[in-house]
Amino acid sequence: MVSPVTDPLVVADRLGMGYQAVDGSLRQVVSDASFHISLGESVGFVGESGSGKSTLARALLGYRRAGGMFMGGSLRFQGEELTTATPQALQALRGRAVAMVPQNPLSSLTFHQRVGAQIMEVLQTRARLDRAAARVQMLELLARTGLQDPPAIASRFPHQLSGGQRQRVVIAAALACQPSLLVLDEPTTALDKATESQVLELVRNVRRDSKAALVLVTHDLNVVARVCDRVLVMKDGRIEEHGTVREVFRAPKTAYAQLLMAATLRIDPVQAPAVLPVGSDLLQLNHLHFSYPSGGWLFRRQPRSTALRDVCLELTRGEVLGVIGESGSGKSTLGMVVAGVLPDTGRHLRWEGEPMPAALAQRPAGLLRRIQMIFQDPLSSLNPRKTVGDAVIRPLQVFHGMTPTAARVRAIALLQELGMESEYMDRYPRSLSGGQQQRVAIARAFAAEPDLLVCDEITSALDASIQSQVLAQLQTMQQRRATAMLMITHDLSVIWKMAPRVVVLKDGQVLESGATVDVFARPRNAYTAALVGAATEAHAFTA
């Protein structure tokens, strides 16, 4: 245990938190949490999905989700008690003294407002800058977060940015008022390893220059090892273990902490993906080009944005093909074109040797079933008004004609394969953790029994132990059913475990492709070498 420090910024003493269920029952999700955080210190909150780490981190802003409440204990920020603070006091605190970078950048940005205007709003309302000064500061913040061409980025809407670009915009907004405490909830889940390194370096510099305290909530233990001084390991709402990163990572005292350390994926020759026999041709992309439509009004129309250029690849039945690249490289666009979410304007797609309709509306029902997609953001892809059971049951009835009873039994079995019990069937997406939401999306996709599964960052919301379990289950299901997968991710260790072959994208073009072992061991260009180098660096467990 770390020795107490003087004048801590945050002090929690036996804090308890809970949620009131629909039936009126109370479920405690944080119990007897005691810790402290000082200015200039960085603390990591780690644990499996549903462990309470995000709930505890949000409490540092005095925030509770709908139905949430404090259940005893104390939580003080700069000496002020947050559990009893008035809404006015919390409003004055948030954004100025303490700021947060949420897990899901898309849902935290206003979809109909340009991102530059959103950052300027923070600067004008919180930092009290005039419009001209706010614009200058906004562009500087975008540049500091590593975004290229800040004026162009500032003029775009959230949906026109990649996941990594959106995350960096949210980080810029959080840094706007130079808070004393910065809470980051899974800030690197949407970032490739090269961009992740840049963002983490930015966070380190901000912490060094401003002496701000940092709380990092993440399932990526490698990120904690690189950024944090201390770490809290949470399980079932309790702090299982805490200490310096060096102490906990090198010699974890509890069985659960030992499990987390062992479950972290690495680029390790022992874990190299097995090369399976090549099946028949399933999908071909022939010189695929894709551009997003131009935007703007009347005479201020912007030029079309080219996302994919001359992409050629093929996928055989039962094969797993990895697609890697930095944020904005076009890898998610590629997946959505294949799935029909973004219709290709030419005839560049072939399915089993035959031309394939580009748009979903033109594809026959059989083909809709055979190609399924799991999106990067599970919450946005799930209907908030439908239960988990509704989400998984629907494809079973639509594609397989199952009766409600049979579909419910099958849906429960799919969820159980992914570590979720039948009690989750009647819950709504927002009552689940990020990792649980992603597992529901995976179960829904497999309910259709597809021949091709497009996976867009499917493990980005999963902690290390659950990620390892889900990938192992995916691999078993894929090999048993000969399901082909297009595995899109910024996590090279996932590609190393799952995909015998990989394609590297940059600026919408294929830089190189080949066997994963060869590409990772002997990259043919500096860009691939940088991606592999950043991923390898991220697995160093030394403080």
Image (tube, helix red, strand yellow):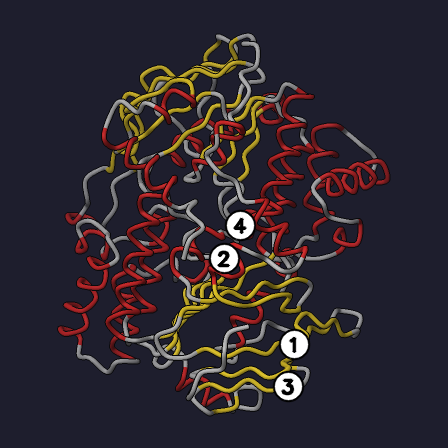
Residue tagged 3: 73
* Foreground disc of the pair 1, 2: 2
- SS class of the residue under badge 4? loop
Residue tagged 4: 461
Q: Decide which of tag 2 and tag 4 comes sooner along the chain.
A: 2
- SS class of the residue under badge 1? strand
State the image quarter where residue 276 is shown.
Answer: top right
Between the C-alphas of marks 1 and 3, the distance is: 9 Å
* Foreground disc of the pair 3, 4: 3
Amino acid tagged 4 = Ala
Q: Decide which of tag 1 and tag 3 comes sooner along the chain.
A: 1
Q: Residue at x 48, y 66 (%)?
A: 244
Using the rendered image of the protein, determine whether residue 106 is visible from the camera's viewpoint. no
Between the C-alphas of marks 3 and 2, the distance is: 25 Å
Q: Position of residue 163 (x, y in %)?
A: 39, 48
Amino acid tagged 3 = Gly
Q: Between residue 215 and residue 154, name the one nearer to us.
A: 215
Q: Between residue 276 and residue 42, name the one nearer to us.
A: 42
Which numbered dot is residue 17?
1
Residue tagged 2: 218
Q: Residue at x 42, y 22 (%)?
A: 517
Q: Decide which of tag 1 and tag 2 comes sooner along the chain.
A: 1
* Foreground disc of the pair 1, 3: 3
Q: Position of residue 441 (x, y in %)?
A: 61, 43
Q: Between residue 404 and residue 283, name the one nearer to us.
A: 283
In the displayed structure, does residue 61 sit left or right of residue 109? Answer: right
Amino acid tagged 1 = Met
- SS class of the residue under badge 2? loop
Q: Locate the C terminus by quadrant.
A: bottom left
Is residue 201 shown above or below 20?
A: above
